[in-house]
Image (spheres, helix red, strand yellow):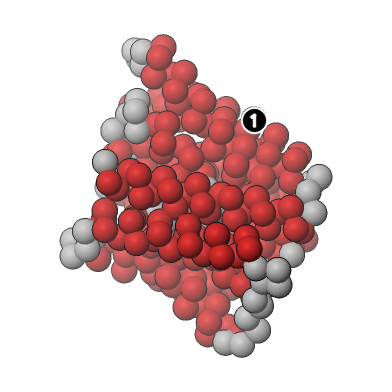
């Protein structure tokens, strides 16, 4: 089996290491970081399931570390609704233009993060219960099926609920892992996991796990306030990336 050019391999390895680190540190953001690198070296049909595979692997590696933050009564409504939302988002692909959608989400992320960064006492939403949690999960699932954007909705909602860093990871990580796994299974059924995918998987998967391990080590050294700032910065970068890629 012929290997890709060395320049492409370097780009993919760098993307896997950076995305794995961000994912290990924050529990979200793998696809947005990795795709910025990988789409320079491979087609979207290969890059999309590859981000799902590596994202799931990174989540599985760090799951034991954040398991204490998982609150199943809080997570299940979001997770169940998110799984339902994925095929809905996939069906909407034929009726929604992706670039305007990404620009809108990007603008929302940038304004939300800027606002939260300057608020001394961030708002905490206590009402709505499981119905509100399920609505956010459904939104994340739809956005995941439509544009691979399952992470922003639960990340923002966990902050607005006033969760600490372990509780935020306990919501974001299992949610994103499940949505990515469903996306990977869908790609397999569609026949996208070909020989090219397997070559890139063999190259990027080990590097992803190394990056995730480094990010997880740093996660253990930050407090709740620092983690909140890290997530806000990640959301700003994600929003700017979405806007920039859509305008191009």
Q: Which residue is mark 1?
A: 210
- Dot 1 crowding, Cα within 10 Å, few <14, some 14–19, many 20+: some
Residue 48 falls left or right of residue 131: left
Taking the image as drawn, is residue 2 in sight? yes
Q: Residue at x 65, y 84 (%)?
A: 126
Q: Quadrant of residue 129?
A: bottom right
Q: Residue furthest left?
A: 95
Residue 81 vertical position relative to residue 148 in the rendered view, above or below: below
| Residue 61 x, y percent position in the rendering | 66, 43
Above or below residue 10? Residue 108 is below
Task: Indicate the position of residue 25 as horizontal and vertical percent values.
Answer: 66, 45
Q: Residue at x 36, y 50 (%)?
A: 243
Q: Which residue is more in the foreground, 234 or 16?
A: 234
Residue in the picture at 40% in, 56% down: 106
Judging depth in this view, the residue of 98 and 180 nearest the camera is 98
The image shows residue 120 at horizontal and vertical percentages of 70, 68
């Amino acid at each position: 089996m012929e290997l890709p050019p060395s320049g492409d391999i370097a780009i993919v390895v760098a993307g896997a290491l950076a995305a794995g680190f961000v994912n290990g540190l924050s529990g979200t953001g793998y696809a947005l970081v990795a795709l910025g690198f990988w789409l320079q070296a491979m087609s979207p049909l290969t890059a999309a399931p590859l981000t799902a595979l590596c994202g799931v692997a990174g989540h599985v590696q760090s799951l034991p570390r954040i398991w204490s933050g998982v609150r199943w009564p809080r997570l299940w409504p979001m997770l169940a609704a998110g799984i339902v939302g994925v095929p809905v988002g996939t069906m909407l692909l034929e009726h929604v233009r992706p670039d305007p959608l990404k620009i809108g989400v990007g603008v929302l992320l940038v304004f939300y993060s800027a606002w939260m960064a300057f608020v001394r006492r961030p708002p905490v939403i206590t009402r709505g219960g499981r119905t509100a949690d399920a609505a956010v999960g459904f939104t994340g699932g739809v956005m995941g099926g439509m544009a691979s954007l399952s992470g922003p909705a639960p990340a923002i909602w966990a902050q607005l609920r006033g969760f600490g860093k372990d509780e935020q990871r306990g919501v974001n990580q299992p949610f994103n892992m499940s949505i990515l796994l469903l996306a990977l299974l869908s790609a397999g059924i569609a026949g996208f996991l070909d020989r090219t995918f397997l070559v890139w998987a063999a190259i990027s998967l080990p590097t992803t796990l190394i990056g995730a391990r480094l990010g997880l080590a740093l996660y253990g050294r930050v407090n709740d306030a620092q983690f909140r700032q890290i997530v806000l910065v990640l959301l700003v970068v994600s929003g700017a990336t979405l806007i920039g890629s859509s305008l191009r």
